[in-house]
Image (cartoon, helix red, strand yellow):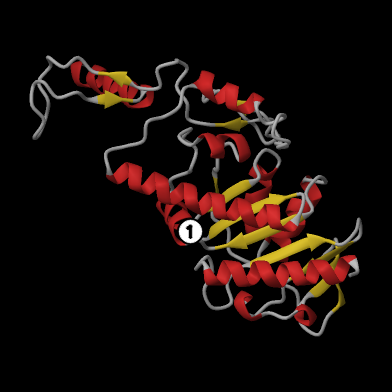
Amino acid sequence: MQLEERLRADIVEIGRRVYERGFVASNDGNISVRLDDDRLLMTPTGVSKGFMTPDMLVTTDLAGRKLTGDRDASSEILMHLAVYELRPDIRAVVHAHPPTATGFAVAGIPLDRAVLAEVVTTLGSIPIADYGTPSTTELADAVRRFIRAHDGLLLANHGALTVARELFAAYYKMETVEHFARISLVARQLGGERVLSREEVNRLQHLRGRYGIAAPAPLCPPDHEAGDEVSCQTVDAPSSPDARLVAPAAQPRVGSLGLDDEVRLTYRELTALIADAVKQLR
């Protein structure tokens, strides 16, 4: 099987998977892959990803001009082109609207807490790119701000984007983003996530080479001042082997908690409480 023929079949299969898993509805989503240094293979506009055939796909150059195909390339091609421009290591892009992850994007909540070892190792943090009107340069520019240091993004009020060196790896990262979002939502409903420490995050980062996992950039501390040229990711992880503080049990609690109940706070939550208390004293 020729390379292009195989890649066409792979895009069709990934389109079927994102549709059957409910990551897209109707004609949502788009998928692309580099054929070579000068050409892309991409899903067409106006077609359900669950019912594509290989002949429907479109080839373009890296400026987005159509080279072959009876249909037009996805209207969101500018977002894909921005990825390929800034990440020469990337060969594939998947964009979808997985419900739980998109819910976080709509709520303005990034998936940046270090709570799952597998996610820290493979994706690091998953920030939210600012809202941009779909199919415009606004969305492409929003993606540009983060894509140098992240293989997975939430798109504000829109969906999610994942990238990788080959097609199925990009798709599997989309699965990971949605799986992480579901677990995070359940944990928050049950009272909150127990965050891994910064030290543990660093250990997980060092395991990447052992597992053959490449990362666009190392994780950095939460106080890192990142400019336009992002050099590292930010992940919410306290700088202590103890990822959570335990408040003294003898202090009175608010609400239904009793005097002997244990309350656990993250460093961020404790800092916010102290800052609020200081304001009250002024």
Left or right side of 148 for 36: right
Q: 76 or 250: nearer the eye?
A: 250
Q: Residue at x 82, y 68 (%)?
A: 6
Q: Is residue 101 above or below residue 241?
A: below
Q: Residue at x 80, y 50 (%)?
A: 85
Left or right side of 218 for 160: left
Categorize mark 1 by other alpha carbons within 10 Å: few (<14), some (14-19), many (20+). many
Label 1 sits on a secondary structure element that is loop
Q: Amino acid at mark 1?
A: Asn
Residue wearing tag 1? 157
Name the spot of residue 11 as percent of width and height, x first: 72, 68
Q: Residue at x 42, y 51 (%)?
A: 182
Name the spot of residue 267 as percent of width and height, x first: 37, 22
Residue 77 visible in the shown view? yes
Labels in figure, total:
1
Q: 65 or 126: nearer the eye?
A: 126
Quarter location, residue 5: bottom right
Name the spot of residue 32 as percent of width and height, x first: 74, 63
Residue 130 visible in the shown view? no
Q: Is residue 82 above or below residue 255?
A: below
Q: Quadrant of the N terminus?
A: bottom right
Q: Is residue 97 above or below residue 117?
A: below
Q: Residue furthest bottom?
A: 70
Q: Quadrant of the C terminus?
A: top left
Name the spot of residue 61 as percent of width and height, x first: 87, 65
